[in-house]
Image (tube, grey):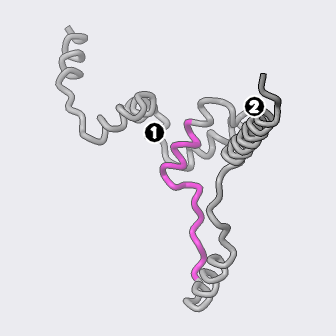
């Protein structure tokens, strides 16, 4: 009887649009948000669990699914972001100017660069082979 009530209550649950979107994006994330107790834990408890996992598993801890899940939860909460110390407006302007000068130009990744080099090499090879074929005597 009690199981029927629970099933009936589950069937009547209404989901928000953001929950549906989260489920569409990644069902595992949706499940963890709904059912994982770590989601309800506060930030200090999550950090404590990360430290605990690091002590138990050493350098392999970041590869653990539980560690990764807790790390993602903390990232979503903004727990790793540092609050900048209060500074003068002049110092902020100078810092922004320095950062603009120092900021690297948007580039492409190593993998994309390697693919581009490979494409250029193949193009050069194709042109060379066509040139050689023109120089060969015709039968």
Q: Is residue 59 above or below residue 96?
A: above
Rendered location of residue 79, percent (x, y)? 55, 55
Drawn side of residue 53 relative to residue 82, left or right: right
What is the span of residues highlighted in magenta in the rendered image?
Answer: 69-86
Q: How many marks?
A: 2
Rendered location of residue 91, percent (x, y)? 62, 88
Q: Is residue 83 magenta?
A: yes
Residue 85 disc label: none
Q: Quadrant of residue 101?
A: bottom right
Callout 2: SS: helix
Rendered location of residue 122, percent (x, y)? 73, 38
The residue sitting at 70% across, 48% down in the picture is 113
Drawn side of residue 38 relative to residue 91, left or right: left
Drawn side of residue 7 relative to residue 57, left or right: left
Foreground of the two, 138 or 71? 138
Crowd tier of the residue under label 2, counting other residues whose Cα lies within 10 Å: few below 14, some 14–19, many 20 or above: few
Residue 57 disc label: 2
Q: Is residue 54 magenta?
A: no
Rendered location of residue 81, percent (x, y)? 57, 60
Direction top: furthest residue: 1
The residue sitting at 56% across, 44% down in the picture is 45
């Amino acid at each position: 009887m009690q199981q029927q009530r629970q099933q009936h209550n589950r069937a009547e649950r209404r989901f928000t649009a953001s929950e549906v979107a989260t489920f569409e994006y990644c069902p595992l994330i949706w499940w963890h948000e709904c059912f994982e107790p770590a989601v309800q834990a506060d930030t200090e408890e999550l950090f404590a669990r990360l430290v605990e996992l690091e002590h138990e598993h050493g350098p392999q801890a970041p590869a653990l699914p539980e560690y990764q899940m807790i790390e993602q939860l903390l990232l979503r909460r903004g727990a790793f972001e540092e609050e900048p110390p209060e500074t003068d407006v002049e110092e902020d302007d100078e810092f922004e100017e320095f950062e603009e000068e120092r900021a690297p130009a948007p580039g492409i990744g190593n993998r994309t660069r390697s693919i581009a080099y490979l494409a250029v090499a193949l193009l050069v090879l194709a042109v060379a082979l066509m040139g050689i074929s023109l120089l060969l005597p015709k039968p």
